[in-house]
Amino acid sequence: MTKINTCPYCGKKSLELREFETAVPFFGKVLIMTSLCGSCGYKHSDVICLEDHGPSKLVVKVSKAEDLKTVVARSNTASIEIPELDLRLDPAGQSQSFITNIEGILMRFEEALEKIETLRNSAKKSQYDRIRRKIELAREGKSPFTVVIQDPRGNSTIVRNYKISESAS
């Protein structure tokens, strides 16, 4: 289905909204929504899980570099916590589902840390450096940690022994 709406950035009635339902591995039945403004180029996309499997808690123990390749499918309702690193990602209004691996989750935390410019350039620089170093050691497989995913709708999953293809040959 396609609709035309008002763009939240430029205010013109040129925002094309497209949505369709499909089934996606790991997530099941989903609604895929895409918005694109023909005037200013604003774009946004989202995947919304349409199934509810009940609350779930998933735990992955990471003790060696190979564990970083474990694939994770996180729905937009799930939180991710790494207690040993004092890291937590909670769902918010614009949370998006994603499929990545444990290393990709660590990279997301690194990117978020980089955006906290005030922490990096303040009296709390030592705290910033400490968190950054913990994440680096975890990404190098030198520091064991636990990933805990809690999903009230049960649409997240951990896929063990699943290899993401590196080429489309």
Image: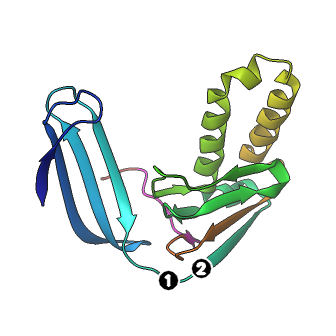
- Residue beneath the point at 37% across and 64% down: 48
Residue type at mark 1 is His
Image location of residue 62, percent across then percent down? 75, 61
- The magenta segment is 157-166
Left-right relation of 101 to 66: left
Q: Which of the 4 image quarters holds residue 67?
A: bottom right
Image location of residue 145, percent across then percent down? 80, 57
Distance from disc 2 to disc 1, alpha carbons, whole Å, reads 7 Å
| Secondary structure beneath label 2 | loop
Image location of residue 31, percent across then percent down? 29, 66
Q: 42 or 130: nearer the eye?
A: 42
- Residue beneath the point at 24% across and 27% down: 10
Q: Which residue is mark 1?
A: 53
Q: Main secondary structure of the magenta part?
A: loop
Left-right relation of 77 to 130: left
Q: 27 or 142: nearer the eye?
A: 27
- Residue beneath the point at 24% across and 69% down: 21
Q: Which residue is mark 2?
A: 55
Q: Residues within 10 Å of mark 2 (few under 14, many from 20)?
A: few
Image location of residue 53, percent across then percent down? 49, 83
Residue type at mark 2 is Pro
**Height in image: 88 above or below 7?**
below
